[in-house]
Image (cartoon, coloured by chain):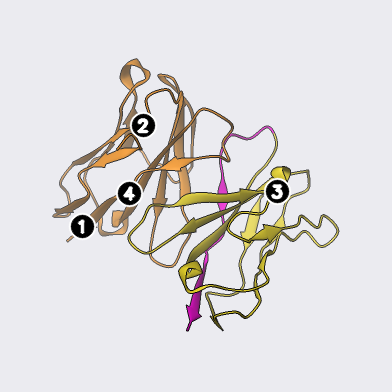
Amino acid sequence: AQRVTQPEKLLSVFKGAPVELKCNYSYSGSPELFWYVQYSRQRLQLLLRHISRESIKGFTADLNKGETSFHLKKPFAQEEDSAMYYCALTPRSFQKLVFGTGTRLLVSP
Amino acid sequence: DTGVSQDPRHKITKRGQNVTFRCDPISEHNRLYWYRQTLGQGPEFLTYFQNEAQLEKSRLLSDRFSAERPKGSFSTLEIQRTEQGDSAMYLCASTLEGPGELFFGEGSRLTVL
């Protein structure tokens, strides 16, 4: 079965510090990986996807198939990055997203 | 606002009552999903529609749950004989692309007393 693990429930950093939100997955095939974000009092929204290899709001994520990881990184955290972050995967040929339990990022001034 | 809308936003009911949630997707999106989220967990897949056809249902969806999407537009999720364990946030999402690029609604929070 497919599984997404986010080991940290809470990650607290100071403004300007680097951030790495961990995500590990278990799936025998080649999944598509995503990061979703939910800011306070807003709806869940897509942040980025691995196939795009893009940087969104300064965040990047690299798929490491050897380590089955898809960690989210940002070199300098901003207060507005404070939010709930969910890693998710969709197995190829499946039609649903499997989410992790989420990590709350708190960026303090 | 042309995003996904859900109604009601919050429903409080007594155990044993029936409840129905409605979701209006983004108009051109042909796929519609229902997820459930409980405290401290990520969203869990319940079911999805492509146009009016319900193509997949999770094992989480007991016989007390039924979802419809008549005419391939809005969708309803009904829970019959609610139980306290049904208390959760019910999220609707829609997409035109694959299952990963979902546009979520704000959710309908169910509290079963």
Give me the C-alpha separation between circle 1 and circle 2: 26 Å
Provide the chain ID for the residue under circle 3. Answer: A
* Amino acid carrying mark 3 in the image: His
Residue B112 is marked as 1
Marks 1/2 same chain: yes
For residue B91, the mark is none
Chain letter of the residue beneath label 2 in the structure image: B
Residue A19 spot, x, y in % from top left: 64, 74
Q: CA distance from mark 4 to mark 1?
A: 19 Å
For marks 2 and 3, give the CA distance: 25 Å
Q: Does the magenta segment cover residue A74?
A: no
Residue A90 lies left or right of residue B17; in this view the side is right
Provide the secondary structure element on which disc 4 rests.
Answer: loop
Q: Which residue is mark 3?
A: A50
Q: Is residue B82 above or below residue A18?
A: above
Indicate the position of residue A94 as horizontal and vertical percent values: 63, 35
Examine the rendering and report whether any part of residue B64 can be seen.
Answer: no
Instruction: Give whichever of B65, A21 is nearer the camera.
Output: A21
The disc at residue B25 is 2
